[in-house]
Image (cartoon, rainbow, N blue to C red):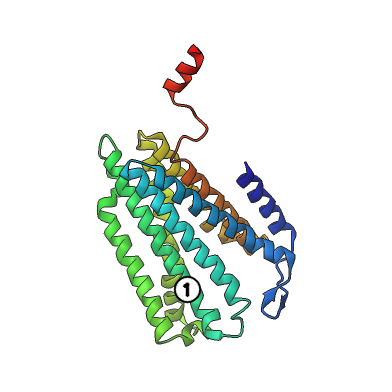
Amino acid sequence: MIVLILGLLGSAVGLVYPSSLEVSNGVPTDLGYLIGFALPITLFVYAAYWAFTIRKGLGGWIYRNQAFGIILVSLAYLVELVGNLLTITVFANNQYLYHVSFPLRFDFLALMTFYWIDSSMRTVHDVDPLSRDTLWWSKLRYVFWALIIFSVGGTCILAAVFYQYFINPPAGALAAILSFLLIPALILVTYVPGIIGLPIGAIRSKDKYLRNQLIWFALSSFFLIVLAGVASIIPNLPDVTFLLAGFCLYRSARSLVPLNKLPAEAVERKNEI
């Protein structure tokens, strides 16, 4: 309940406050902007903490693996958020860090996210009583990985050798195609298969805890990617989508254990007493 209230409060503040940033000596002083970063960071830290705590108490390798995935993705989101905050404040005058670090951080986030999606899709196949190959994942996963590695590798080469591409992007059809392959295509290949495949695999799973965990994670990807597409319409929408994604990751980790529920044997003993 506390996490839900925190997410709703942060969403309301993110929509009410203007998106302008006031910086003094490299430190943002705009209250709305500070809250817009502080609350999502808090939620992702909480999600990682929950996943880490739960993982230590889980016995099955499947649940432990799923909790580990939530830790990786939460930490990747934290790197993205903290990196954004540092590049627009402390390193705002460093053109290389300001322009080049974003695609590199996003590539790290995409790699961690797709690694977990790939692991989860294979887990779904293992626990499916009929061993159904959801979205032909056993074959298409190699195509997705190849596209992601190509995009990430291209970004790293540009950042290391042709970093002026990010500082002064060239015009023309070739530059437009390259820009699409580096970010939008990476988003489609990384998140869309998870948004579509994880709920399908979750529905087929007979494990209700795994099913809930996969659905919550798919929702986190949906909120962050799909809603961010209309960020130009609603001010500070990226703040809200990060909050929603953080809340969904927290619920994804929490879904792995039956919290606040007594085992059936305990309930029967309590009724006998």
Q: Which amino acid does label 1 sit on?
A: Pro
Identify which residue, 267 or 66, lies in the foreground: 267
Q: Is residue 38 left or right of residue 170?
A: right
Residue 88: x %, y % from top left: 61, 76
- Residue appearing at x 48%, y 87% in the figure: 164
Q: Name the residue under label 1.
A: 103
Q: Can residue 270 be seen in this view?
A: yes
Compared to residue 15, the image places residue 134 above or below, namely above
Which residue is at a point 29% across and 56% down the rendered structure image? Answer: 141
Closer to us: 84 or 223? 84
Rendered view: 129 above or below 126 = above
Q: Residue at x 70, y 67 (%)?
A: 19
Q: Can residue 185 be seen in this view?
A: no
Residue at 63% of width from left, 61% of height from top?
A: 38
From what the image shows, is residue 128 above or below residue 136? above
Q: Foreground: 247 or 152?
A: 247
